[in-house]
Image: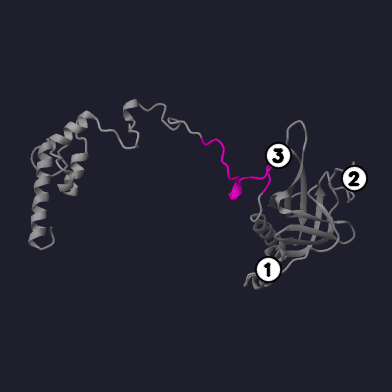
């Protein structure tokens, strides 16, 4: 039963009082009362099967009264722990936030603008394993709709919500420590339409495999000892230029063969290095 009968307003403190109590380490944080985020006059209508303390709109009471109740006037308190409502004449209740599964601003229509809420009853039936739908509508002055909604949102974010099955939701960081279904298949994310040649083969250490063709190309490019080559030469030596045709626009020189372009690029790099050495900036 998500609604707990109460007859007194909740024991709560203001944000300023909370800040003062927590400015120094208290003996126990559990003894600090919850912060009161909103308080005001309200009218509440319930459609909660487990709550039989109020008369319903059709006049039924008791265990068989599952209809929508009349709008009951009273005072509502929104703390960081729960929502409490103390009616003027009838039984009050407290609703913990994990049982408040949904709250939304509802514009005026057949009824005045109000806050619509769904409540998790916590009990499931044998047929579909889902909790019975329970609803609450809160009617306040128009200028209090947004403050009330914001207070409900801020407090709800402090608690783990419940799934329709009654289990705690893993949303917003409330997941269990043990994750399930962590066994991934090696080719799970491979593109089904991608040709085999488009995949990057790796060795057991995760490094890309070097094909014989690539090794031959590197040797022909004069990779030599990588430790003695400059970074640009190392880069050029690692590129597999096999089958790559220049369009003649890579560098502005006659000829379009790849080797001629590389020769010109290496020449310009050598000239630049010489100028840097002359200026005292080179190695």
Q: Is residue 261 above or below residue 212?
A: below
Q: Is residue 141 above or below residue 56?
A: below
Q: Measure the C-alpha gap from mark 2 to mark 3.
A: 30 Å
Residue with the mark numbered 2: 58
Q: Position of residue 107 (x, y in %)?
A: 70, 53
Given contact means CB atoms under 8 Å apart, are the residues at marks 2 and 3 in contact? no
Looking at the rendered image, the disc whose residue lies closer to the viewer, 1 or 2, is 1
Where does the magenta region start and end? 161-182
Residue 177 on the magenta segment:
yes
Residue 134 on the magenta segment:
no
Graded by Cα atoms within 10 Å as few (under 14), some (14 to 19) or many (20 or more), the crowding at tag 3 reads some
Q: Is residue 65 left or right of residue 15?
A: right
- Of the pair 44 and 99, the residue shown nearer to us: 99
Q: Residue at x 8, y 55 (%)?
A: 274
Residue with the mark numbered 3: 165
Looking at the rendered image, the disc whose residue lies closer to the viewer, 2 or 3, is 3
Q: Is residue 124 visible?
A: yes
* Magenta span main SS: loop
The disc placed on residue 66 is none
Residue with the mark numbered 1: 27
Q: Secondary structure at mark 1?
A: loop
Q: Position of residue 190 (x, y in %)?
A: 41, 31
Q: Quadrant of the C terminus?
A: bottom left
- In primary-sequence order, the first of circles 2 and 3 is 2
Q: Quadrant of residue 44?
A: bottom right
Q: Residue at x 32, y 37 (%)?
A: 207
Q: Quadrant of residue 141?
A: bottom right
Q: Is residue 272 left or right of residue 139?
A: left
Q: Is residue 23 left or right of residue 263?
A: right
Graded by Cα atoms within 10 Å as few (under 14), some (14 to 19) or many (20 or more), the crowding at tag 1 reads few
Q: Position of residue 178 (x, y in %)?
A: 58, 42
């Amino acid at each position: 039963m998500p609604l707990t009968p109460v007859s007194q307003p909740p024991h709560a403190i203001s944000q300023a009082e909370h800040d003062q109590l927590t400015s120094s380490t208290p003996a126990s944080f559990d003894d600090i009362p919850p912060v009161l985020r909103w308080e005001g006059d309200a009218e509440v209508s319930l459609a909660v099967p487990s709550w039989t303390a109020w008369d319903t709109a059709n006049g039924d009471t008791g265990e068989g009264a599952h209809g929508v109740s009349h709008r009951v006037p009273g005072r509502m308190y929104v703390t960081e722990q729960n929502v409490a409502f103390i009616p003027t004449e009838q039984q009050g209740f407290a609703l913990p936030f994990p049982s408040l599964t949904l709250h939304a601003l509802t514009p005026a229509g057949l009824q005045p603008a109000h806050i619509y809420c769904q409540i998790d009853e916590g009990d499931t039936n044998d047929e579909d394993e889902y909790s019975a739908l329970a609803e609450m509508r809160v009617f306040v002055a128009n200028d209090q709709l947004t403050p009330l909604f914001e207070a409900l949102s801020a407090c709800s974010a402090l608690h783990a919500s419940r799934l329709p099955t009654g289990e705690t939701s893993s949303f917003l960081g409330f997941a269990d420590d043990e994750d399930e279904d962590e066994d991934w298949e090696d080719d799970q994310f491979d593109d089904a339409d991608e040709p085999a040649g488009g995949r990057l083969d790796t060795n057991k250490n995760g490094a890309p495999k070097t094909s014989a063709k690539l090794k031959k190309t590197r040797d022909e490019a004069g990779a030599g000892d990588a430790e003695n080559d400059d970074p640009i030469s190392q880069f050029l030596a690692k590129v597999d230029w096999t089958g790559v045709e220049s369009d003649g626009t890579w560098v502005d020189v006659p000829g379009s063969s790849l080797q001629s372009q590389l020769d010109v690029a290496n020449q310009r790099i050598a000239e630049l290095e010489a100028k840097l050495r002359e200026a005292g900036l080179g190695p």
